[in-house]
Image (spheres, rainbow, N blue to C red):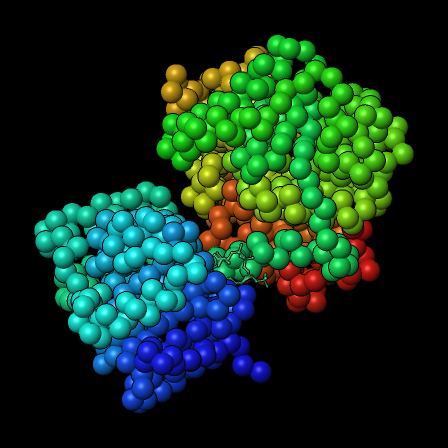
Amino acid sequence: MGKGRTTMEVGPDGVAIVTIDNPPVNALSADVIFSLKESYEQAMRRDDVKAIVLTGARGKFSGGADINSFGSGKKEAKIGSMSVDFVTDVIEGARKPSVAAVDGLALGGGLEIAMACNSRISTSTTQLGLPELQLGIIPGLGGTQRLPRLVGLSKGLEMMLTSKPIKGDEAHALGLVDAIVSSKDLIPTARRWALDIVECRRPWIKSLYKTDKIEALGEAREVLKFARAQAQKQAPHLQHPLVCIDVVEEGIVSGPRAGLWKEANSSYELQFSETSKALIHVFFSQRATSKVPGITDLGLMPRKINTVAILGGGLMGSGIATALILSNYRVILKEVNDNFLQAGLGRVKANLQSRVKKGVMTQENCARTLTRLTGVLTYESFKDADLVIEAVIENVSLKQKIFADLEEYCPSHCILASNTSTIDLNLIGERTKSSDRIVGAHFFSPAHIMPLLEIVRTHNTSPQVVLDLLDLGKKIRKTPIVVGNCTGFAVNRMFFPYTQSALLLVDCGLDVYQIDRAIAKFGMPMGPFRLADLVGFGVAVATGAEYLKSFPERSYKSILIPSMLEDKRAGEATRKGFYVYDERRKASPDPEIKKYIEKSRSVAGFTTDKIMKLADKDIVEMIFFPVVNEACRVLDEGISVKASDLDIASIMGMGFPSYRGGAMFWADSLGANYIYSRLESWSKTYGDFFKPCSYLAQRAKRGTSLSAPVNQAKSRL
Ligand SMILES: C[C@H](O)CC(=O)SCCNC(=O)CCNC(=O)[C@H](O)C(C)(C)COP(=O)(O)OP(=O)(O)OC[C@H]1O[C@@H](n2cnc3c(N)ncnc32)[C@H](O)[C@@H]1OP(=O)(O)O
């Protein structure tokens, strides 16, 4: 069966309406392109066709090339033909004009085809953009040449390098679209516009040859130089943004057709790059997180949540409240006294004000958004809540008391969620009879910014409750992952060995700053010691104790952080941790930490100095292989149902580089056997911290990937 097609309908006015039809987003599959070509050939042949209006079915122009087909073609396939022979010669070069009627979205190849039309009419809310770079490729259907010629070089480069779409209104102001109309008027206006071109009442424009928006060569070179510097600064590990700039430059220096050929060659090559494979894996994995067996396949519908009550206005509670009111939820924020309440409400206001300062929110919108927030000191108004999120300090008996109170004050349909990052949910709900509606809603700090939401369910949590939270997560623009109940759940648990292995390496003689540099070079936003400073040593010690209690046989206990904490050196908040911080929070290495390190090494008693001179690659492996090992346990125990969820968790929760596809995807690129044998040999020298788990051992032995699905029967979810 084919995947998508175009239809053609010729009106009595002589305008052929060609519609791209490939649900859900009218992606340009091979079948769609083939059918589009046929429609154009037919339109050229037919005497009753004077002009063409190109549009998309169901209110969406096109979401671009079909990402499913990327990297699957044979490398020797003919290149460049589609962009030059079809888009440029057949659409743009046709002897009958085309007008694109653009609604909903025109992204990637979708926008590129629209730009090859001789005019574009759109609605004000349509999203238009070239997001190819976020998939590790560059525009391949002429976008690198036509976009700068329509909107100017700086704006065109900005749109490509950031991958961010713009709305119809802005596109109109920039000259990317020629008129804005309502959805209802889209096709009639485009029809008239096309006939106006035929009858010379409007210009017949070929974007590829426009020159009025492009700066003179000298100035253009300056813009390109600036763009290169920006790309290198923002994505120092990535090549394809620089390739994109080179391709744009080629068109400016040697003419647009030369630019098209360079674009065709480069975009084809990039499709097969490791970076692109990893980023496309991330694209699909992110969408797959909300498909949960046993939850989303039961035919249930999410219930409507209008009012959310939050307990605790600290950093987490106020961040969660901010995220919710920004997405139109009514929020009740409860605190224990007026001082705390005002501080909590103040934090929410400050979060919104910072959006106003950045120019992403107007003052009026900020004021309107705040009207959705109410502060309270009692449970009285909880009778209206559809969901409660408890975000108080990590104290079991306090949480038990709160959940018993919630059962009394909230309506029986109300979901009772905890934002705990470590405590067992069964323990929290022990004094209630509501275990079917108790669930974890673990946000990451700062909650209004970090994109991940870990939804934790126990054996008793009902599928309906999980579905409701999945729906809420999507509405507040988070990526939700559903996980089972255990110490640290999925994200924190898979990453607990991250800091511990770094501490072990230091106890064995390695330099703190060399470790941080190696890990940052690998692509993490910061190394484990800079991260420990940021999180604060108090939290690090408390969570370390939890892991030691739950997984004593494989926890590494170093005295380094506790002994620094004893001297009131607690991380960035005290301006002293592994680094010292100036008044602008800039971190510098601190020679004073030497004394703590020496003490820690003597207590650890490692005699070997063999690993004193590790290469960066070995540091990365000794830090991340224990993370992969723990992730394997998380999968084996059914805490997480698919490896791709852990990829997303590692990227969005911990900052693992997305261009490496996430921790498990990266591990599979190295091979289970390699990871197993390295862990096995380290465990002989340094102990059980490195001991490979049975899941890893079995997969290494069988030669299967770590991401291959786990036997469903073993799932604990
Ligand atoms: C040659 C060219 O230069 C190369 C290109 O065009 S590369 C492609 C460029 N286009 C893109 O990067 C757009 C990617 N898509 C998106 O950003 C978003 O999906 C969207 C804004 C189109 C829609 O978002 P949203 O409404 O939230 O729905 P979302 O869940 O993301 O997508 C709906 C479905 O369409 C699929 N889909 C979206 N875009 C797709 C594409 N370009 N190809 C194939 N499938 C696509 C998704 O995988 C998802 O499938 P599922 O339901 O089976 O999970």
Q: Check the image and report above or below for 569 versus 711.
A: above
Q: Nearer the viewer, residue 71 or 479?
A: 479
Q: Residue at x 71, y 49 (%)?
A: 302
The furthest residue to the front: 12
Q: Residue at x 57, y 19 (%)?
A: 345
Q: Quadrant of residue 205?
A: bottom left
Number of marks? 0
Quadrant, the N terminus: bottom right
In the picture, measured across the screen, residue 534 lies left or right of residue 241, that is: right
Q: Nearer the viewer, residue 217 or 518?
A: 217
Q: Nearer the viewer, residue 340 or 356?
A: 356
Residue 684, position as x, y percentages in the image: 68, 46
Residue 133, position as x, y percentages in the image: 38, 56
Q: Check the image and report above or below for 381 versus 655.
A: above
Q: Check the image and report above or below for 429 versus 21.
A: above
Q: Quadrant of residue 384?
A: top right
Q: Residue at x 65, y 59 (%)?
A: 706
Q: Nearer the viewer, residue 627 or 126?
A: 126
Q: Quadrant of residue 304?
A: top right
**Residue 634 appears in the rendering:** no
Residue 168, position as x, y percentages in the image: 36, 52
**Residue 671 appears in the rendering:** yes
Residue 541, position as x, y percentages in the image: 65, 24
In the picture, measured across the screen, residue 686 lies left or right of residue 580, that is: right
Q: Check the image and report above or below for 489 versus 301.
A: above
In the picture, measured across the screen, residue 39 lies left or right of residue 212, that is: right
Q: Residue at x 14, y 66 (%)?
A: 254
